[in-house]
């Protein structure tokens, strides 16, 4: 570890922290229907969409109607994107002449992008046409991100409102997310990325002659626009197979910093939106503090592990950190930071290959995802996931003092606890059961590129990444086979919608309750004690659930490396 490395990490943290309050204030005004700088330009467009869809900004929905609208919208997205892939061979904007995508891979990809996962069992530049990349994948990057933000707003209203029957309007929330937040920010980011050298063209691939006289095809395309939304919307799918390790997708240190900040910007700002909407910004800062503690711990462990290097290499008398699978342009510090950021959020973009990390360095990205990616998390998704843990933490606090659990003046009762537990348990259900089946299936094991505990980690990482809607991978696993395409797709659906529906049910239940004034016995939820309790509950739940599986993978791999054992 170096002083320069820590300075770069602190610069990133400082920029994100400075963005939280202004971005949170802007988002609060947008979703409250207040006038903003963009209202004169976008207001008529917004109202036009409402007229076309048969709704209005004053019409609100019960949580069940809100959930149904979100599910139908997502289903339509899966069907359309699946059809585009199957027909891309006869559709326009296909200068490379790529053929139709197979049925299992089309299913996996459609589900992946609609659930904001962006797991890719294919090489983007060689499998998808420009039309599918732009009108299919990029559109879903906007739509899935907007849907996550919309659901988070509905859940926030559940905590903020009293004696209410509605939690907002899905169509209004989603429209405002795209028009006022995602689209303007992505236009700005796209221009910045183009200025830094990221391609943005509809022209065909470039043919070049190497020094040896061989012909080389250099893939280009509408990269910058997809890069902007994949980061800001925590989607993560790369235009190029090498993702943000590709020099066209991540030219230099400035583009790398922009990408990292973009991943965290909206998710971190949603904590401030929460504080403003419940009338106490300290509540939002407390949640962000809990996220920050978990994030800082993850960065410290990963950076330390990668800087320490591989014990097997040290045994050969070679000192130094682990540079395997890392871009020399970014080094160990920024590669470690990027890995923790992208798995703390449900992004999945990578600028280094996670499968080449040391055992403990790869352990942290796994844990980040297994905790539900509540450490900032995906846009919207991480925040309502964190609120599920808050419900559990408040319940634990109530048990300790023998009082009915309360949060923000709302009594937390049996229904809310059951829904929160259901939302939290659906993730290990998808992650661990599919992993257990895959490790005993000869055809599934045959797709693993590494023997021993690291091979087990490759399978565990794949299902963890899918259910956590992340999309990153340990590169040794060949996922483009029917078993993985189908089961990973099912895991993505479980990880997305089996969390959203209980979260909306809690929102509807809390919105209908009356607010109870605070008393002398009310547990304060904006101070260090609550932050510590919340962090403890998250770690205990994650530790008890996933430690046995982690012990079979990264932990055993690390102990074996120390003892000099290879596989």
Image (cartoon, rainbow, N blue to C red):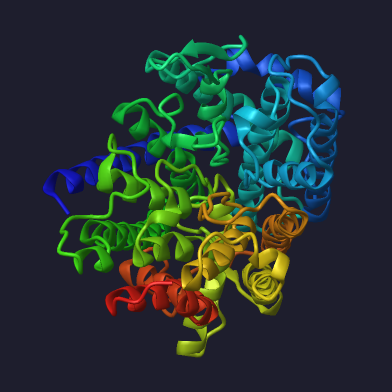
The quarter of the picture where the C terminus appears is: bottom left
Which residue is at a point 48% across and 73% down the rendered structure image? Answer: 453
Q: Is residue 550 above or below residue 526?
A: below
Quarter occupied by residue 223:
top right
Which residue is at a point 57% across and 12% down the rendered structure image? Answer: 201
Q: Work out whether residue 280 or residue 485 is closer to the camera in this orientation and state it.
A: 485
Q: Is residue 155 above or below residue 502?
A: above
> Could you tell whether 499 is left or right of 540 in the image?
right
Tell me where residue 18 appears, x and y as whole percent.
Answer: 31, 38
Q: Is residue 76 visible?
A: yes
Q: Work out whether residue 373 or residue 492 is closer to the camera in this orientation and state it.
A: 492
Which residue is at a point 67% across and 40% down the rendered structure image? Answer: 144
Quarter occupied by residue 53:
top right
Total number of numbered labels? Answer: 0
Q: Is residue 371 visible?
A: no
Tell me where residue 122 appears, x and y as whole percent.
Answer: 65, 40
Q: Residue furthest left?
A: 3
Q: Work out whether residue 232 or residue 445 is closer to the camera in this orientation and state it.
A: 445
Tell me where residue 560 appears, x and y as whole percent.
Answer: 35, 77
Which residue is at a point 54% across and 41% down the rendered structure image? Answer: 234
Q: Residue furthest front?
A: 212
Tell me where residue 205 appears, x and y as whole percent.
Answer: 58, 15
> Could you tell whether 396 is left or right of 44 in the image?
left
């Amino acid at each position: 570890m170096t002083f320069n490395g820590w300075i770069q990490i602190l610069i990133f943290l400082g920029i994100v922290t400075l963005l939280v309050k202004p971005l949170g204030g802007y988002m609060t005004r947008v979703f409250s229907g207040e006038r903003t700088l963009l209202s004169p330009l976008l207001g008529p467009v917004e109202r036009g969409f409402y007229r076309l869809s048969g709704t209005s900004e004053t019409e609100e929905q019960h949580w069940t109607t809100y959930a149904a609208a979100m599910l139908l919208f997502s289903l339509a997205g899966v069907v359309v994107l699946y059809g585009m892939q199957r027909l891309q061979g006869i559709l326009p904007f296909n200068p490379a002449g790529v053929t139709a995508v197979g049925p299992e891979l089309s299913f996996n990809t459609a589900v992946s992008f609609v659930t904001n996962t962006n797991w890719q069992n294919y090489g983007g530049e060689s499998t998808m046409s420009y039309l599918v990349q732009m009108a299919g994948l990029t559109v879903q990057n906007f739509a899935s991100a907007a849907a996550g933000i919309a659901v988070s707003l509905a859940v926030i209203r559940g905590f903020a409102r009293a004696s209410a029957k509605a939690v907002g309007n899905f169509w209004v929330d989603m429209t405002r997310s795209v028009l006022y937040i995602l689209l303007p920010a992505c236009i700005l980011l796209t221009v910045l990325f183009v200025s830094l050298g990221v391609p943005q063209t509809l022209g065909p691939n470039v043919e070049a002659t190497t020094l040896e006289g061989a012909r080389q095809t250099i893939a280009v395309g509408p990269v910058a626009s997809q890069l902007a939304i994949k980061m800001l919307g925590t989607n993560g799918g790369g235009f190029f197979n090498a993702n943000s390790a590709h020099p066209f997708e991540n030219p230099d240190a400035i583009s790398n910093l922009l990408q990292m900040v973009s991943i965290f910007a909206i998710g971190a700002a949603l904590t401030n939106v929460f504080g403003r909407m419940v009338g106490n910004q300290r509540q939002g800062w407390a949640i962000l503090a809990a996220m920050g503690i978990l994030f800082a711990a993850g960065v410290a462990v990963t950076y330390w592990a990668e800087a320490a290097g591989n014990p097997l290499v040290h045994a050969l008398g070679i000192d130094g950190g682990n540079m395997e699978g890392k871009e020399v342009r970014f080094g160990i510090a920024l590669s470690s930071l990027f890995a923790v950021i992208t798995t703390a959020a449900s992004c999945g973009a990578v600028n280094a290959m996670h499968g080449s990390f040391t055992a403990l360095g790869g352990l942290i990205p796994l844990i980040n995802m297994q905790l539900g990616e509540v450490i900032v998390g995906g846009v919207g998704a991480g925040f309502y996931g964190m609120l599920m843990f808050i419900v559990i933490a408040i319940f634990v606090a109530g048990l300790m003092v023998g009082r009915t659990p309360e949060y923000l003046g709302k009594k937390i009762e049996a229904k809310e606890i059951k829904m929160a537990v259901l939302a939290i348990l659906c993730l290990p259900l998808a992650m661990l059961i599919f992993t257990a089946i895959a490790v005993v299936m000869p055809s599934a094991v045959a797709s693993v590129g590494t023997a021993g505990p690291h091979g087990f980690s490759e399978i565990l990482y794949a299902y963890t990444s899918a259910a956590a809607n992340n999309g990153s991978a340990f590169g040794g696993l060949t996922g483009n086979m029917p078993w993985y395409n189908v089961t990973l797709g099912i895991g993505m659906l479980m990880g997305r919608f089996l969390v959203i529906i209980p979260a909306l049910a809690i929102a509807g239940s809390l919105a209908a309750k009356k607010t109870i004034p605070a008393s002398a016995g009310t547990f304060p939820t904006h101070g260090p004690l609550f932050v510590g309790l919340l962090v403890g509950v998250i770690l205990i739940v994650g530790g008890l659930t996933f430690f046995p599986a982690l012990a079979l993978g990264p932990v055993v791999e690390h102990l074996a490396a120390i003892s000099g054992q290879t596989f």
